[in-house]
Image: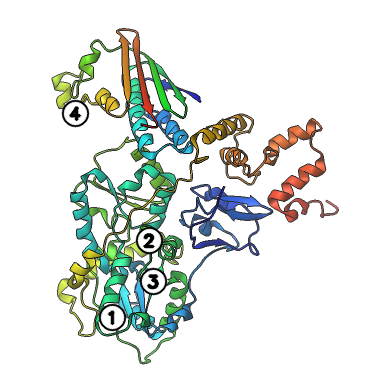
Amino acid sequence: MHFEFNVEGGNFSKAGTASSQLKKILKQLNVDPRIVKRVVVALYEAEVNIVAHAFSGTIYIDIDTEKIEIKLVDEGPGIPDIELAMQQGYSTASPEVREMGFGAGMGLPNMKNNTDRLLVTSEVGKGTTVEMTTYLNS
Amino acid sequence: MEHSNFHHALKIREDLCIGCSHCMNVCPTEAIRVKNGKSVLYGDRCVDCGECFRVCPVSAIIIDHDDFNYIFDYKYRVALVPAVFTGQFPEDISLRQIYSVIMDIGFTHVYEVENGVEVLAEAINEVAAKHPEKKPLISSFCPAIVRLIQVKFPSLVENIMLLKPPLDISALHIRKELTSKGIPEEETGIFYVTPCAAKIAAIKDPVGEKSSAITGVINMDILFNKVYRQVKQKNNQLCTLPVEGMMSKKATCWSLTNGEAPYVKGRSLAIDEIKNVIDFLERLENEEVSDIDFLELRACDESCAGGVLTISNRFLTAERLRNHAEDYHPNLDVQHPDATPKIIENKEYLMQHIEIGEIKPRSMMKLDENMAEAMKKMEKVNRIMQLLPMVDCGICGAPSCQALAQDIAQGEATIKNCIFIQKILEQRGELSLDESIQIMQDIWGFGKTNKYRDLKGI
């Protein structure tokens, strides 16, 4: 089954709409609640990333009886060093900004912990694509 | 689809129901449909919150309870009274008057439910410290909330603390005390005075436990009427002097909103009213909110003071309980020789029995047990949704277009139930007027469609 959701950059009041929708779908499909929780947490994190950093984005979700595949494509600034961004605690925020409480640098690592496969590709100045796969029978 | 298996205290009386659909429209879990002019309850979705009971204009929704005279089957009759019961009475009626009258009308003992809090509060903090993985710990106090999480938020079931509510702890205490006086267990009847339907369901069909220590349930409105009448009629007659002591401030206010939360270590939040709770749990499930240690969640606005079986205004009840709590002073709390010993004296025994078994999810959301089948049904739901008008008018007998689409996919309704589709089918000549009237009558009953037809001379 295929689903698509649009994400608006900068609108935090709508952030989480796609993850809520996916959660409802997975519950209706009788997916194990623990898997639902992991998938939804990962998607929420990714969705908020688009809202926080990009101009706009689209979420493509494909579900079959084996796996859930989610692809998030955004138009935005892109990530210069993905490997660095994947490290826990890494953030683009400056020390002063972080002292105020911004940018804890938990986003990508949290997504990785909650999916079976995570692939991030990015082009600076164009945008970022995040692909996440979760297997249902592992 | 199966629609029962669970005991519900809420029942719809078919002889009284006028099929007005008020209940269907307020049900937070979409558990009600209208068929043949009567409301029908889907038992697997109902959480006994009682919102339907509140709005029924003809009192066709009833709350099952035990007959008052059932208490006389027992030699020793304990009234287990929650603090909100005393909050139902005007200020000029004292707590002692209320207890005195409860004994005059047939009980041998009166005991306040929230005494159990003295043992429970400590146990909550112990569980929180022992199970950091359960964070946030969700209170098991409100049975409608426990059921709501089971049916609507299965992934949060693990967060519910597996501890008995104050009610069951107090019942165990009083049972033990009476047994220790040599009273045979079968001669003791413990009767809980309930402010809501969910507590009844919890006693008749406990979650995480095999049986309840409580013998029977009496609805609060019924006992209030009996007691208030006696209070009014009593003038200088002999009366029974109650012997029980007072409850602490903490215990008196426990059943009100923010009654539990302040006593749990860490960051606690109190949320009342079932729609507020649903909204919050949606966010919690997405992990949009984190770092909360404890959640006090109650189905009714103003918690038990707003229970569906209460009589007084919920805000006045809450105010009275706070006043009672202010009146408490340890120095005034002198133990009467005949009173039930303080619950804390039985702490060790009660702590051994305070835990309840595993609470299992019973999701109402799933379209089918089998995922492949569920996907087929979901595709069907999505196709149907594109045909429906999305106005949620309820004329089809379901609370929303989405609910109708799901009912159709489950084989429990047809798309012809939608009035918009009917009009198109009529226009195309695929549905006769007689058939269309018949469909309406199958949903709303014979009477409603004939009111206008039978009227002459407009």
The residue pinned by badge 1 equals: B178
Q: What kind of residue is marked 1?
A: Leu
* Label 1 crowd bin: few (<14), some (14–19), many (20+), radius 10 Å: some
In-image side of B448 versus B299 (left or right): right
In-image side of A9 versus B128 (left or right): right
In-image side of B7 versus B190 (left or right): right
A57 up-or-down from B361: above or below:
above
Q: What kind of residue is marked 3?
A: Tyr
Q: Alpha carbon of mark 3 to alpha carbon of mark 2: how far? A: 14 Å
Per the rendering, the mark at residue B304 is 2
The residue pinned by badge 3 equals: B192
Looking at the image, is mark 1 or mark 2 nearer the viewer?
1
Q: Circle 2 sits in a helix, a strand or a loop, which is it? A: helix
B384 up-or-down from A53: above or below:
below
Task: Of the two numbered discs 3 and 2 on the same chain, state the one appearing first in sequence.
Answer: 3
Could you tell me residue A43's position as x and y percent?
36, 27
Residues tagged 3 and 2 counted as in contact (Cβ below 8 A): no
Q: Alpha carbon of mark 1 to alpha carbon of mark 2: how far? A: 28 Å
Q: Quadrant of residue B315?
A: bottom left
Could you tell me residue B90's position as x and y percent?
38, 72
In-image side of A19 versus B438 (left or right): left
Q: What kind of residue is marked 2?
A: Cys
Q: Circle 4 sits in a helix, a strand or a loop, which is it? A: loop
Q: Nearer the viewer, residue B223 or B125?
A: B125
Q: Alpha carbon of mark 3 to alpha carbon of mark 4: how far? A: 50 Å
